[in-house]
Amino acid sequence: MEKGTLVEFKVQGTPRLGVADRPEGKKNWVVIDGSGHAHVLHPRQITYTVEDVSYEPSDIDGFLAEVRPNIDPDNLEVAWEFLQEAGESTDPASLALLLFSEQSPPLCYAAYCLLSNDKIFFKRKGDQYDPRSVKQVEEVRHQQEREAARKLEWEGFLSRSHQTLTAHQSDDSVAGEVAPTIAWEKTDRPRLELLERYATLGDDCSQKAAAQEILKALKYKTSAEDAFQLLVDLGLWSPHENLALRRSQIPLQMSDEVSAMVQQRIDNPPPDADADRLNLTHLKVYTVDDESTREIDDGLSLETLNDGRKRIWVHIADPTRWLLPGDDIDLEARRRCTTVYLPTGMIPMFPEALATGPMSLRQGQICCALSFGIVLNEAGAVEDYDIKASLIKPTYRLTYEDVDEMLELGLKAEPELNAIADCAQRRRKWRKSQGAISINMPESSIKVIDEEITIDVLENSQSRHMVAEMMILTGEVAARYGEAHDLAIPFRSQPEPELPSDNELLQLPSGWVRDSAIRRCMPRSEMGISPARHATLGLDYYTQVTSPIRRYTDLLAHFQLKAHLRGESLPFSPEEMTELTQGVSTAAYEAVTVERQTKRYWALEFLRRQGNHVWPVMLLRWLREHESLGLVIIEDLGLELAMRFETSPELGERFDVRVAHANPRQDFIRLEMVPDTAVASEAVA
């Protein structure tokens, strides 16, 4: 290269022209650009050279003025069409001759600029440029269009996000104003779902980097907690979004296909496989539930037999009337496996139109049921029983409070209800004589309506005992029938617990402390198709059949029992039943976990909102006594929490605490003892 040679080079990726001024070392040259700035260049950094003409740096602007009018990409397409058809390659000089009919340095450089900037028509091979095929050009253009569309979508998403964030911030700052609603596009949904997955799964999200790119673009930090906050700020999530539910496999919506089938079943009920149902509509039927319960799946009656004995009838809803094993509704229920009860509402196993409609035992309507007629002996053991597909007509829709009041008043107009309660007491005593273990720890009900939280301790009332005993009795009868006829149904059992000795229990304060110690020793119940003893209930055989609208294993038992009662082959073989119960048990465990985590979240949120409220608590047991970490129960709420003490109180000791800090999202709470109490303490979650 000689002094005065005009060359092109790049500064931070941008082409620039300069004039060779002098050598620098063995290979480098000092080049002066149009602004008079010097650049030291290696020959590899030079991308184009204007040969055989000498220039000064002051000539560069004039040179470019001749070049620019001739850089028209449309000209390049015309040249491509000609060269592609002729099958010829080109170079800047040849292209200049083809396009401009001359090869002056400015026109050759203009041709070079067209070729070097081209991404569509030509492919460089050394100093030559080969025209792409028509198919290749179409593909490149298609890719460019897709990329342009993606860029437009991305910019649109960011714009809508900024508008939404600005609107919500404005709404927060101006009282009484409502932020305008920004309409999200269909193309925004994948990015929003990506943020949701990252906020839900954190580091386990497979597309974490892409989610973090969105967060950075919107000026947020890049943690999963920041993704959560962004979704809240965008108005897409509540500050109390249920992450435990989102992490689960629990489906929240029914498919359109299932919904359509449900409506079809309601409009055109299938033929009843139990056409000869026992008509029990003459019996007075009591359904007893919480006031908020909508799936009414059990009712109670009492019948006086000719010999004077009393027959208890436990009527269970018969959802099998509305579906067949293996149909879409059944498979959807199998996938869900249980109704999930959360403080914010329920997620039903069956579509609500069925579950709260024709499947439920609705007051004043003739309903299909599976009825268990049971006669007890004087001690409370089962003396005789019968199981029938039936028709009933529920008389009373009662709450537990209603029944408690009626039993307390001993209403003469309802002798059946009083007799059923007496049978339940007799039954409870009999089970205790058979080794049943009674644990009376308080249970609390947490409800959230419009983010208002209420926590009620469920009363250990006569009505609840009555209903519970009748359900356990029905489970024993169903299991006895299954065992007697060798049916593959989901039997429930529980191994004998290794309880503390009588002497050890006597050393503990009576009541909750002693019950907590016993509860700690109880092994988990088991499920299988072979009957075995259930230690806690004091029964040799037991299954659950009383909630077929809400528990899929109960529904499985119904399918099997009803088929056998009709004299038909069972719909599920022992192998199929084993496989089904194992799968359902796993899904049910996940549902229970979500319920517990959600209830704990709202319990901690309730306590957080109470500020400095003072709560009376009792120390139930030590979790790690060497660390002074114990389990306390808030007596007014029935909530159990871990607490670390500076000095150790006695088991059963009562004292007052307040919430020092609570973060429900992080599942953390710290309690502290209020001043002037017996023991100074600090608590941990």
Image (cartoon, grey):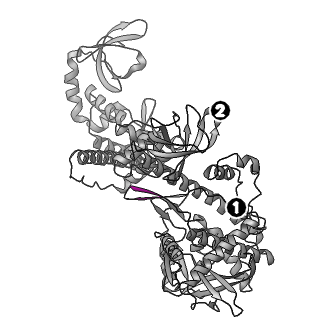
Whether residue 11 can be seen here: yes
Q: In this rendered view, identify the residue nearer to me: 100 or 647.
A: 647
| Residue 273 visible in the displayed image | no
* Residue 397 to residue 601: above or below: below
Q: Residue at x 27, y 30 (%)?
A: 107
- Element type at mark 2: helix
Magenta highlight range: 446-459
Query: In the image, residue 601 lies at what x, y percent?
Result: 48, 49
Quarter-wise, where is residue 431 in the image?
A: bottom right
| Residue 614 percent across, percent down from the top left | 43, 44
Residue sitting nearer the eye, 232 or 79: 232
The image shows residue 282, relative to residue 262, as above or below, that is: below
Instruction: Determine crowd level at label 1: few under 14, some 14-19, many 20+ residues with C-alpha closer than 10 A.
Output: some
In this figure, which residue is indicated by the disc labeled 2?
Answer: 626
Q: Amino acid at mark 2?
A: His
Query: Which residue is depicted at the point 65% across and 92% down?
Result: 276
The amino acid sitting under disc 1 is: Gln
State whether residue 5 is above or below residue 649. above
Q: Toward the viewer: 319 or 50?
A: 319
Tell me the residue that label 1 is attached to: 582
* Foreground disc of the pair 2, 1: 2
* Label at residue 39: none
Left or right: 160 in relation to 43: left
At mark 1, the secondary structure is helix
* Mark 2 / mark 1, whichever is N-terminal: 1
481 is higher (above) or lower (below) than 613: below
> Quadrant of the image for the N terminus?
top left
Quadrant in the rendering for residue 17? top left
User: In x, y percent, where is residue 613?
Assistant: 40, 45
Horizontally, residue 55 falls left or right of residue 211, namely left
